[in-house]
């Protein structure tokens, strides 16, 4: 009788013990082309560009943006909470670091802790709001939160050195831009490690579960309230630390660069990079951080001419000047393409390559690998 | 002392009295059925018991503790495992991931050691994976281990959901229509599984079910709800012939008129069975209605724990003496239950 009852389902019986395997009996040699493929990138990113006087700050920016991207990814990609106020956490981190270093004479290393804590605190506050409000209205509230901070706290005299900007001088060993890039890179690696651990521990699973269905998460014993708050705190901490890095990168913190545009850029780069994908988010962030440098005047001219051609009709000539808003323009275009064509963002586009790099044979169409953080199309479109 | 004791449970949604004065007892190692027509308040009762709804009145007691206001995630950690009427799982994750997520409360490490990646947390993760694999193996679902849950058939999902509920290391299992989406054969198989799971894990089970043969086969005691009130309770065989229950399902004295409105084959089957009772047709379909008390569960290689079987054979009495309970508990080995290890 037991044999009858526990007969395996037909599917299990039919499938062979080992799944189909592509021939790859090359052994360790198969890593050789992959390493050769990666070498130029590693060389350029870790040596060539950092040694360039103009390149190093851009790379540092890319690292800082990437940390913010990972921070936003925890909220949007894993927990399903939209934040349009990340410029707030970022700015608080920057101001906290600059203020504590310059005015309070706090040791350099401790300023990062302070920046992280300040970011976490404000994020916790926002988390409490998110417990009550979801969706569109949460997005609105976070937006207002960022705007309010920009107009209030970032204008306070003692914090901003009477509006002139709070100086934040790097210690001597970081004067060199190249060294500072490596410094930022180490922070990025730390953030990547935390993100990696997050997804591989119960915390990440809890966040992914509550993103999809809070009731199911509760039935699994997940304290939804606590883990939502935790996601905000983690995100705020990372954003705060990134803000501190920005403070040292620029050397002086003013409210001007920390407006809503920045928050929008953060969200755009995360979504275009690929929600839920670590590498995608980092690439998206790097792209947006370097966009203003990549798109020099020639490119702006090309885009502008193109737009004028498209939008002019009859005797009417369109008067367009996109010089100041080229990042926003590209971002909007990228967002549109992401939402309509590839919800997985850049990460989805480069998946054949990343899959190949991870040791599997190259193929364009194989979407079987569905990591814990991988997204369904709906998560972007929702 | 019952494992689960519900007293005077009432809840109201606006003008609708969804539950009124519900009393319900679930004893150790029992499988208790909760049946009733659509909208009778069965799922609402589940939601109140598991803490998803806050009842307007009444109490829920779990092993002597008042847990009426305990939030669901705490209850899950205490030992309430539940499934949902519509499959409750993380659909974008794989079966394995779901089973690991379900073990959240018993993961054995805290959030920060998980983030730092201490050795203990990594070892604990390994254990979670092992347990998930064991459950997949137990339910014959190893084939979908690394497949996304969303693409699976409804019947498979229901089974995997049962696995997820098991992964929470439950003491009481609350199953909301576990056989929906399954064919008759699969349903029968599930019945056998429930009996086996009770034996293996020492579970107490409360189950909402429409599939009558399954209820007759596995349940020790059945509660019938109608319009938020308890209509009848008793052993399955008693409930089967209860005139009020029959009336509630058929909606009156005119079964022929209603027979035309059968929505699904399952309803039709159910009604036909009840109809048979009304008209005194005693010949029962032989394979579908085994007599639960007498039939051994398994072949003679494994033995049943003594107590559940003995209890099922004995007439159920409310308010057992304390001595009897202790006796019953002592006599019941709970073979593979490893609560101490988990905590």
Image: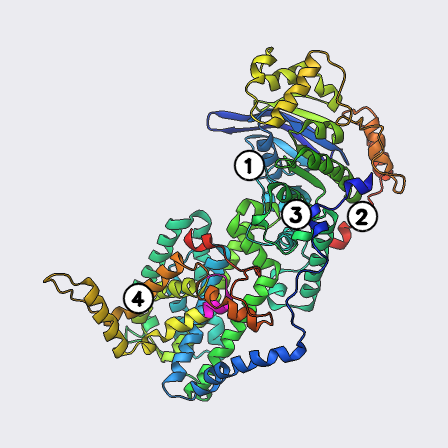
Q: Is residue A272 left or right of residue B11?
A: left
Q: Which label sits in the foreground, 1 or 2?
A: 2
What residue is pinned by disc 3?
A: B164
Residue at x 66% of width, y 54% of height? B145
What residue is pinned by disc 2?
A: B336
Please state the chain letter of the residue tagged with numbered disc 4 in the rendered image.
A
Identify the secondary structure beneath mark 1.
Answer: loop
What residue is pinned by disc 1?
A: B53
Does the stretch in magenta take in A314? no
Please determine if labels 3 and 4 lie on a single subunit: no
Graded by Cα atoms within 10 Å as few (under 14), some (14 to 19) or many (20 or more), the crowding at tag 1 reads some
Q: Position of residue B333 (x, y in %)?
A: 85, 42
Q: Which label sits in the foreground, 4 or 1?
A: 4
Q: Which label sits in the foreground, 3 or 2?
A: 3
What residue is pinned by disc 4?
A: A328
Q: Quadrant of residue A283?
A: bottom left
Query: Disc 1 or 2, which lies upstream in sequence?
Result: 1
Graded by Cα atoms within 10 Å as few (under 14), some (14 to 19) or many (20 or more), the crowding at tag 2 reads few
Whether tag 3 and tag 2 are in contact, CB under 8 A, the answer is no
């Amino acid at each position: 009788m037991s044999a009858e009852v526990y007969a395996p389902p037909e599917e299990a019986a039919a499938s062979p013990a080992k799944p189909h395997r592509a021939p790859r009996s090359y052994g360790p040699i198969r890593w050789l082309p992959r390493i050769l493929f990666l070498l130029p990138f590693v060389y350029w990113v870790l040596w060539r560009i950092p040694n360039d006087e103009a390149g190093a700050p851009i790379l540092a920016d890319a690292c800082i943006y990437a940390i913010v991207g990972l921070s936003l990814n925890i909220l949007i990609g894993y927990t399903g909470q939209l934040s349009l106020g990340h410029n707030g956490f970022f700015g608080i981190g920057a101001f906290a670091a600059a203020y504590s270093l310059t005015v309070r004479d706090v040791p350099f290393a401790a300023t990062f802790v302070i920046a992280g804590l300040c970011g976490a605190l404000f994020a916790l506050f926002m988390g409490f709001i998110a417990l009550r409000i979801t969706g569109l209205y949460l997005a609105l509230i976070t937006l207002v939160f960022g705007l309010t901070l920009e107009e209030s706290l970032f204008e306070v005299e003692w914090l901003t050195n009477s509006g002139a900007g709070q100086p934040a001088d790097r210690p001597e060993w970081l004067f060199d831009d190249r060294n500072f890039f490596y410094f930022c890179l180490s922070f990025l690696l730390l953030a990547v490690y935390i993100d990696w651990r997050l997804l591989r521990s119960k915390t990440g699973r809890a966040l992914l579960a509550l993103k999809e269905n809070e009731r199911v998460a509760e039935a699994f014993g997940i304290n939804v309230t606590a883990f939502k708050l935790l996601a905000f705190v983690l995100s705020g901490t990372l954003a705060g630390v990134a803000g501190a890095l920005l403070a040292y990168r620029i050397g002086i913190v003013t409210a001007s660069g920390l407006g809503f545009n920045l928050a929008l850029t953060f969200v755009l780069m995360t979504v275009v990079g690929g929600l839920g994908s670590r590498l995608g988010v980092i690439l998206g962030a790097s792209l947006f951080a370097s966009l203003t440098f990549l798109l020099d005047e020639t490119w702006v001219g090309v885009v502008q001419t193109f737009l004028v051609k498209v939008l002019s009709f009859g005797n009417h000539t369109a008067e367009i000047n996109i010089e100041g808003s080229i990042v926003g323009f590209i971002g909007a275009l990228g967002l549109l393409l992401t939402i309509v064509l590839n919800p997985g963002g850049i990460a989805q586009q480069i998946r054949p390559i990343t899959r190949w790099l991870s040791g599997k044979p190259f193929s364009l169409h194989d979407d079987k690998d569905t990591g814990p953080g991988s997204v369904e199309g709906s998560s972007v479109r929702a | 002392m019952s494992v689960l004791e519900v007293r005077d449970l009432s809840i109201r949604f606006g003008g609708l009295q969804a539950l009124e004065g519900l009393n319900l007892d679930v004893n150790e190692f029992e499988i208790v059925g909760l049946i009733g027509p659509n909208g009778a308040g069965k799922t609402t009762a589940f939601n109140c018991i598991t803490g998803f709804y806050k009842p307007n009145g009444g109490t829920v007691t779990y092993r002597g503790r008042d847990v009426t206001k305990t939030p669901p995630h705490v209850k899950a950690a205490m030992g309430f495992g539940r499934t949902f009427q519509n499959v409750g799982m993380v659909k974008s994750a794989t079966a394995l991931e779901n089973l690991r997520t379900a073990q959240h409360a018993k993961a054995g490490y805290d959030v920060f050691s998980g983030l730092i990646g201490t050795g203990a947390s990594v070892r604990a993760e390994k254990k979670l994976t092992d347990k998930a694999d064991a459950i997949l193996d137990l339910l014959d679902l190893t084939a979908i281990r690394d497949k996304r849950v969303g693409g699976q058939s409804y019947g498979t999902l229901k089974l995997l959901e049962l696995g997820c509920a098991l992964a929470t290391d439950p003491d009481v299992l609350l199953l909301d229509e576990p056989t929906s989406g399954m064919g008759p054969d699969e349903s029968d198989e599930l019945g056998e599984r429930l009996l086996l799971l009770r034996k293996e894990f020492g579970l107490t089970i409360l189950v909402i079910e429409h599939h009558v043969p399954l209820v007759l086969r596995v349940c020790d005691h059945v509660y019938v709800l109608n319009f938020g009130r308890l209509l009848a309770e008793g052993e399955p065989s008693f409930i089967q012939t209860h005139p009020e229950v029959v009336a509630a399902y058929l909606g009156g004295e005119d079964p022929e008129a209603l027979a035309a409105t059968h929505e699904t084959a399952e309803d039709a089957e159910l009604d036909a069975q009840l109809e048979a009772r009304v008209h005194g047709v005693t010949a029962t379909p032989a394979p579908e209605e085994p007599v639960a008390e007498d039939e051994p569960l398994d072949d003679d290689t494994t033995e049943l724990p003594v107590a559940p079987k003995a209890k099922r054979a004995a007439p159920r009495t409310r308010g057992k003496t304390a001595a009897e309970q202790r006796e019953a508990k002592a006599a019941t080995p709970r073979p593979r239950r490893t609560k101490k290890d988990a905590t």
